[in-house]
Image: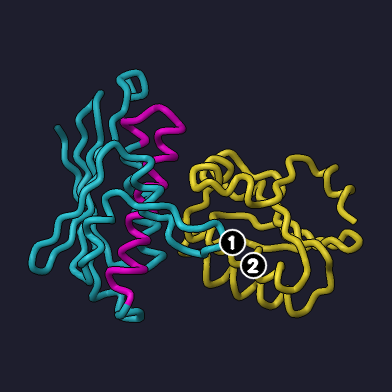
Amino acid sequence: MGTLKTVEQGATLILQYSGELTLQASAAFKEDLNEILTAREFDHLVVDMSAIPFIDSSGIGMLVSLNTRLKSLGKSLFLLNPATQAQKTLELVQLGDFFHILHDEDDLLTLD
Amino acid sequence: MNMYTFSTSASPKSCRLLTKGIMGVLRELVADEETRQNLDLILTEALANVVRHAYASSVGREKENPVEVVITVEYGSAIHIEVSDWGKGFGECAETATCPTLSEPEEEGGRGLYIMSSLSDELSVCQSDTKNTLSMIIKIEERKWVR
């Protein structure tokens, strides 16, 4: 199962998830996310995807759901550095342009 | 042709483990990394489909929910994948299952069948009295196999 760490950078909260994001991981991931979203203050949420070697439609569904939830709270979601399989899968389901994807950690500095 | 049969109970954990076991076999046959990633995703989606839909009404009774995967290898040419369950079948959705449309970007679900259909060359659904089988054929160029 994956591990989830958080890093605060100004008004940006970075989630560093390490592991596969699949149906198997969904319950724990959702639970961890709930705790974070209710306990932390932030304007932007960045999911660092560089250590997610494999994602399936369940994992993508979780990201879509997270995006919807943040939008309703007036906050924004960014995906940082998706690994090759994740990037290809997001493009396969035509969500490559739906999400705000950052390909460089320096791009985090542009978030205000 | 070589045939390999795998089975487990349909829980998220056991299905992902089963996929990893199958990929262990396929890694010895398919050299191309992208093809292997696609096969991994196809199998993961097919088995997740069984967990989420075929046995959706029997969560907590996973041991009673069998799932079987039959892999037939046409070496140098194609891999056939058959995923069978004994749960709720596709029913009236069987016809649309073979040419699924992609869900709207804001929708949480509805992408699994689209992924499987996009990554395979043929996809079909077969339902008998109690058994439901999702079959896919993935053609693989000769140069992508282990020599």
User: Residue at label 2?
Assistant: A68
Percent from the top left, x then y, of residue B92?
Answer: 21, 66
User: Residue A67 appears in which quarter of the rendering?
Assistant: bottom right
Main secondary structure of the magenta stretch: helix
A38 versus B112 height, above or below: below
Q: Which mark is residue A64?
A: 1
Q: Quadrant of the N terminus of chain B?
A: top left
| Left or right position of A61 against B21 | right
Q: Residues within 10 Å of mark 2 (few under 14, many from 20)?
A: some
Magenta span contains residue B33 = yes
Q: Quadrant of the C terminus of chain B?
A: top left
Instruction: Determine the secondary structure under disc 2.
Output: helix
Q: How many marks?
A: 2
Percent from the top left, x then y, of residue B121?
Answer: 29, 36
**Residue span colored magenta:** B27-56
Which residue is drawn at the image coordinates 80% and 74% (left, top)? A40
Which residue is drawn at the image coordinates 83% and 66% (left, top)? A43
Magenta span contains residue B126 = no
User: Residue A112 appears in which quarter of the rendering?
Assistant: bottom right
Percent from the top left, x then y, of residue A82?
Answer: 64, 45
Q: Chain of mark 2?
A: A
Which residue is drawn at the image coordinates 71% and 50% (left, top)? A100
**Viewer-nearest residue: B99 or A100:** B99
| Left or right position of B15 against A8 | left
Chain painted in yellow in the figure: A
Percent from the top left, x then y, of residue A79?
Answer: 69, 52
Which color has been applied to chain B in this rendered view? cyan
Which residue is drawn at the image coordinates 86% and 53% (left, top)? A111
Type of amino acid under label 2: Thr
Do residues under tags 1 and 2 come within 8 Å of each other at their CB atoms? yes
Disc 1/disc 2 C-alpha distance (Å): 6 Å
